[in-house]
Image (spheres, rainbow, N blue to C red):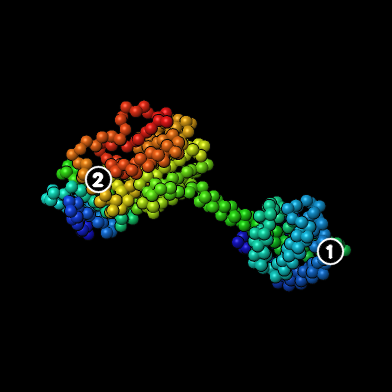
Amino acid sequence: MADTKRSVSVSTRTSEAPGGGALSESSAGLLRELVAHLRQNRTQLREEWARRITRAELLTAMTEEEIFAEATAVYDNYVEALETGTFEALQAYSRRLSERIIPRGVETDEVVGIVLLLRDVLARSLFNKYQDNVEKLNRILDSYEPAANRIANTVAVGFVEERERIIRQQQEAIRELSTPVLQVRERLLILPIIGVIDPQRARQLTEQLLRAIRANRAKVVVIDVTGVAAMDSGVANHLVQTVEASRLLGATVIVTGLSPEIAQTLVTIGVDLSEMATVGDLQGGIEEAERLLADRAAIPGPQPGREPGTELTR
Amino acid sequence: MEVPILRQGQYLIASIQSALTDADLSHLREALIAQVGRSRCRGVIVDVTALDVMDSFAVRTLRDIAHMARLRGAETVIVGIQPDVAFAMVQLGLTLKGVATVLDLEEGLAFLDGRTKDRGLDTRPKRPPSNPPRG
């Protein structure tokens, strides 16, 4: 990651230092000089930066003390990255920082903003120091620019990656939470589905249900779709497949809570509902399920002479 | 690979231990049908718990077994389809419609006990077909 070339070029200067052995030795010297300057002026440059952050109304989710504390850590890491030319420590710090501030509501543009502000603060101080020696200023900036770009990049990307990791984690948690399979009685499972079903969630739902059927030795499953707003043909077919797969494991499925809109959709798109037992509401579905369980002749699986689609009107 | 076929009372139990070739499946079908005819067998259980996959030929063979057994007076039940296998089957459109399927061997025996007791009686539909369709 640290090696990908995705520099954000915010200046018009070339981002590569001129090559050549003699020059690179002096550019190493320049870099040392630059780092020394940044260390010497640490206090006022850091304060200047913190002031500009507040003026730009960034990090409003944090107090001034917090901003100053983080600014200190960022500054020191920044200078160290400049000095050593290595960015692992900065990357690690960036991730830890992101972990801290993302729950506080800090946004990506704020993080990118403050890093660019620091970049600006330091660059201006370099301009001030070397304004009488334009040629040296040029060479100093040649050392500074590529490293500064890389730092901005590292911090921003670290922040974004942490956000993406959290989002993925939350999505997974939501998926798990939103498809609970509940055992209410022996051999009876209820699966209330709430919200939006995308193909991925539908698949997860089915897998979870099949495992639960096996684990609980369920003979009847009530799938309640009262909480499902809309169903397209893909999801409807998934539902039909879930019913069929459950039957292969010996469980009868009763679907409850089909809204008139969804029922209309299913009929219109020609989904095969003949294999699906449906009841108007969840309570009715549970009652029907208990009837099936009590009835010893109610054996799962289609049998000759038995109507597969048990439909009740309510 | 010969599938062992055990006798339990009036039932035959075929326990598939590992993946079967098409030839093995055909052989199993012939063996089961022959035994159903020979003895007074009322039920057949095919246990597929050990199978990780079931292709279309396997599914067709199971259907054939069920149909042929019924012609000879025996009920068939398939037991032990794994969740992953069931999922794959429905996605591929491989159905076992018309064939009873239950979770495991215990359920399979209970099923056959229930069915063979009912044999000779009318298996009436659970709801009269004259119910108005929902909609």
Query: Where B114 falls versus A74 (above or below)?
Result: above
Q: Residue at x 66, y 55 (%)?
A: A103
SS assignment at label 1: helix
Residue placed under numbered mark 1 in the picture: A44
Across and down, in percent, residue A74 comes to 73, 63
Residue A183 appears anywhere in the view: yes
Looking at the image, the residue that sits furthest to the right is A132
Q: Secondary structure at mark 2?
A: helix
For label 2, the residue is B114
* Residue sitting nearer the eye, A211 or A158: A211
Left or right: A11 in relation to A154 = right
Whether labels 1 and 2 belong to a single chain: the reply is no
Specify the amino acid type for callout 1. Answer: Gln
Residue drawn 61% across the image and 60% down it: A4
**Residue drawn at (29%, 43%) of the image:** A296
Q: Nearer the viewer, residue A282 or A13?
A: A282
The C terminus of chain A - image quarter: top left
Please give the chain letter of the residue carrying mark 2.
Answer: B
| Quadrant in the picture for the N terminus of chain A | bottom right
Residue A138 visible in this rendered orientation of the protein: no
| Local crowd size for mark 1, using a 10 Å CA cut-off: few (<14), some (14–19), many (≥20) | few
Residue A290 picture quarter: top left
Q: Is B116 situated left or right of A202 in this image?
A: left
Query: Could you give the CA–CA distance between mark 1 and mark 2, rounded to whole angstroms?
Result: 88 Å
The three-letter amino acid code for the residue at tag 2 is Gly
**Residue A283: percent from the left, percent from the top?**
44, 38
User: Residue drawn 19% across and 57% down?
Assistant: B6
